[in-house]
Image (cartoon, helix red, strand yellow):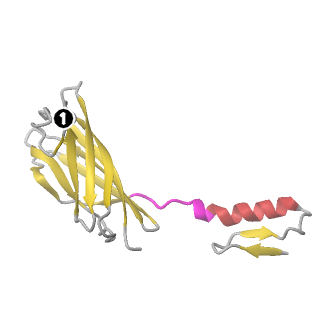
Amino acid sequence: MTQQTAKGITYPESIDHVRMWEHLQRLADDVDPLLDLPDWQAYTATLTGLTLGNGSVLTRYQKLGNRIAVAWSLNWGSTTSGSMPQISLPVAPASLGGMRWTGQGTINDGSGSAWHTGWAVLQDSGTAISTYAVSTSSAITSTLSVAGITMQSGGWLQGHLEYEVAS
């Protein structure tokens, strides 16, 4: 005799202990589909606070239940200008009464040796991820020059953030 969990996973009754390998196989068959993660999807983000010029940007997201993971990689070109961008979202966030979602980033100025820490923030019910650089004095700023960063062609910004959506 067997029973099922709310997610459809079959398990044996406590008195049903013969041929346990069959129950283990059934358990494995039931759990396998639950472990499949959805594929990452590309989306076209709108950037503000930055003129991309001949640079490029790649934005992707993954939806798992009511969680969205966003990742971005911005390659600085010789005609790219501006500062830390705001990156539009692929899916609107849930309104949670003041929740803030934070993520991390890395900045390479293109000199070949300078790496900097970055942060990302999404305000509750926001429409874009705000990105920030950390200065040498540990201040958070959206202005690259204030952080002591001078971007060159070949530099890049990349990061990730997770947030909740309304199912």
Give the left or right position of residue 75, taking residue 31 as reference: left
Magenta stretch holds residue 35: yes
Give the left or right position of residue 17, taking residue 75 as reference: right
- Number of dots carrying numbers: 1
Q: Which residue is mark 1?
A: 135
Secondary structure of the residue carrying tag 1 is: loop
Give the left or right position of residue 166, taking residue 51 as reference: right
In the rendered structure, which amino acid carries the disc numbered 1? Ser
Give the left or right position of residue 50, taking residue 133 as reference: left
Q: Which quadrant: the N terminus?
A: bottom right
- Of residue 144 and residue 154, the one placed in the foreground of this image is 144
How far across and how far down the image is residue 28, in percent? Answer: 71, 60
Relative to 44, does residue 1 appear above or below in the rendering?
below
| Picture residue at 11% right of the left edge, 43% below the top | 143
How far across and how far down the image is residue 54, in percent? Answer: 12, 45
Local crowd size for mark 1, using a 10 Å CA cut-off: few (<14), some (14–19), many (≥20): some
| Picture residue at 59% right of the left edge, 64% below the top | 34
How far across and how far down the image is residue 142, in percent? Answer: 15, 46
Magenta stretch holds residue 116: no
| Picture residue at 32% right of the left edge, 52% below the top | 102
| Image quadrant in which you'd find residue 14 | bottom right
Q: Which residues are magenta?
A: 33-40
How far across and how far down the image is residue 45, in percent? Answer: 22, 59
Q: Main secondary structure of the magenta part?
A: loop
